[in-house]
Structures are given as structure tokens and as C-alpha cells.
Amino acid sequence: MIYFDNSATTFPSDRVRAVISDMMKDEYSGNPGSLHKLGVSADKAYGETQAKVAKLLGASSDEIIFTSCATEGANTAIRGFMSRNSRAGRRVISTRTEHKASLECLSLLEKSGYEVVYLPVGRDGKPDLSELEKALTEEKTALFCFTLVNNETGSILPLDQIVSMRNKLSPDTKIYLDAVQALGKMPIDLHKMNVDMCSFSGHKIHSVKGTGVLYVKNGVRIDPLILGGGQQKGMRSGTQSLLLAKAFEAALEEAVETMDDSHGNAAKINEYLRKELAERKAVILSPEDALPYVLNVSFEGFESETMLHCLEIYDIFVSTVSACSSKAKKVSYVLLESGVDRKTAANAVRLSFSRYNSMEEAEQFIQKVDVIYDLYAVRK
């Protein structure tokens, strides 16, 4: 099997599987809210995990909230900030290439009377900063909502420039960042990045589904999305899962430890595939400076879903659009908003890599693409 769909999800690493197995023991199964020794022990371990994750992300432990996923994090941050901070303004600046988790929150805000300014995005996947500057001088803005690494193209947000512009023109504006595809693949130091809220997902870094983290900078006040017993300082009620928190910690620690080697490996695979696919008249849609873990490519003569299923015959797994939108069978809105013509976008396939992929797999992928094209040419 060749699995090139790691932006959709990754398989749990051996270290994560071992941690989960260990956490299933009775001694770790107490409720962190209970007063007996099992509860006290679980609460202590939960706090230690929170502190470790915070350190790995360049944050303070009281700024870390464990969630079920990045979608929950996006909803909590975007909706929670706007509902809590009415004096900050009723305006949000974003783009139409954000993940659906953010876009649906923004759509809900618009229906509730908030204004959302969507910046145009170029072929490089980056928002037009001249339009951002213009928007900031027009009216008070409460929130920026951006993605650090686009999940379909790998385009990297010019965060430093955006933060600098915010600091100069609208210092009270807060920044929410979707960093799901960046986690474990590029350095993350939240305090140095100068963002106010940030969401992460565990199953994108070889943890399990159902694990996530939301960072909320000290001093930033938001309304919680989930109410109940007041766990996690009232920011996310519900019995804490030590097992899931430990799984996230193990995956993050492993991703950070292997980041340099993993990045180098992905870069080699990406470079090889760009060259080989371009020689076969495929159109490379990911920008040159994209994060190398994602490669979006359009195959001439093959609609994206057709190519996906042709590759699947050979146990090669890729994706078309984001996994959250794939069953709708639509052309990628990310590519269309980036200026890609509809015909090219309709033939686009996303390849996404992890540290477990190899050059041998990339070479086998190219071989099977050739086979598919030969078969197609014969039948045609």
C-alpha cells in the first residue's frame, strides 16, 4: 500500500499505540475530577501532559485547552471570541480559501449581522496584503481568521507580514490561526508567532482521531462552546480524557523530535514528483514555496475522481479535495478562489506525505501513473 493522503488523516504511530495501551490500565482510568486517589492521580497526570504540550508549542500550560478536534477549536475560537467581545467590533477579515471549519463559522457570523471581509487570494495561495492594508484603514476590525498552511495546496501564509501589519495599523485586532497542517512539519512557537488563538488536530500528526488542542493567549477572553461541569477552567466542560491527552502529547513529541529529518524526506519526494509529473504534462498547482508535505497536481485527460480510483486499483491512496468536502463531489473551491480555471481544477489530485513515506513509494507512484496513461491511451 502507498498512502499519499496524510493531509486527510495519518495512521497512529507505534509510540502512540503503546501510550494508548498503557493508558487503558485501571490505574490510569480514574476521573480527573474525583477526590479519591485515582482521581487525584489522573488529574496530576493530565496537568503534566498539559504542561508538556504547552512547552512543545511555546505556550503556557494555562493557555492550552484539549479539544476533540480542530473543528471544535475553530468554532470555540471564532464564535467564542466574537460573542464575548462585542466592543471589539463586528468585523472579521479572512479569505475564501480557509478550511470549512472556519468558513462555516464565518457564514454563521454573517447571518447574525457581522461583517466578514474576504481578501482575494493569488495563484500562490497567499492573501493580497495590499487589500488587507486597505481593509484595516477603513473600519475597526475585531478578528483576523487565517490558515497557516493550506490543506489542499500547502501554501504558507505570510504570517510575519500579517502580524506586523496588524501591530502597526490595528493593534487591538486579534488573530485566530488554523495551524492543523503546519503542526509537526514546521516550527511552532506560539508566543513568538504573536497570534491570539490557534487550533491543532492530533490525527494529522500520527495520533488518534478525537484529539485536538486550542491555544488561547492569556488575556484573550472567549465564551466557551461546551458548557457543563466547568472542566478546563470552564473553557471546555466534560470529563477530561487522560488517554487522548497523552496520545496527543506522544504524537507531538515524536513529530518535533523527527521534524528536520521528516521535512528533508518530504522535500525530496516532493521535488522528484514535481519533476516527473511535469515531464508527463501534468500541471503542478501547489506553489513553489509551499510546504513540501502537500503536492496538488492536475492530470490532463483525467477528472480527479477518475484518477483517484485508477490509483486505488494499485493500492495507492490520494485525495481530490479536502476530506471534509470530498463526498460532495465538487471542484475544489480553494483552487477556484486561487485563480485556477475550472477545467484544470476538476482534474486536480492532492498528494500529501508524512515521515513514513519513501522515495521508493514515489517512484512506484510514477510507474503506476505511466501504466494508467498507457491503458487510457489504448482504450481511447
Image: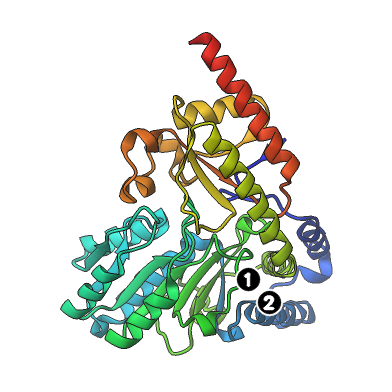
Q: Amino acid at mark 2?
A: Pro
Task: Tell me where residue 197 sits by quadrant.
Answer: bottom left
Asked whether, in this view, residue 213 is left or right of residue 147, the answer is right
**Mark-to-mark CA distance, 1 and 2:** 7 Å
At horizontal 64% and vertical 33% (from top left) the residue drawn is 366
Looking at the rendered structure, the secondary structure element under dot 2 is loop
Asked if residue 196 is positioned above or below residue 177 in the image, the reply reads: below
The residue wearing badge 1 is 240
Residue 358 horizontal/vertical position (percent): 73, 46
| Chain-order first, disc 1 or disc 2 | 2
The residue wearing badge 2 is 32
Q: Is residue 139 visible?
A: no
Asked if residue 122 is positioned above or below residue 171 in the image, the reply reads: above
At horizontal 54% and vertical 80% (from top left) the residue drawn is 190
Asked whether, in this view, residue 347 is left or right of residue 341, the answer is right
Q: How crowded is the residue under tag 2: few (<14 C-alpha within 10 Å), some, or many (20+)?
A: many
Q: How crowded is the residue under tag 1: few (<14 C-alpha within 10 Å), some, or many (20+)?
A: some
Marks 1/2 in contact by CB < 8 Å: the verdict is yes
Q: Residue furthest top?
A: 379
Task: Tell me where residue 223 sits by quadrant.
Answer: bottom left
Q: Amino acid at mark 1?
A: Gln
Q: Is residue 324 visible?
A: yes
The label number, if any, that marks residue 198 in the structure image: none
- Camera-nearest residue between 378 and 7: 378
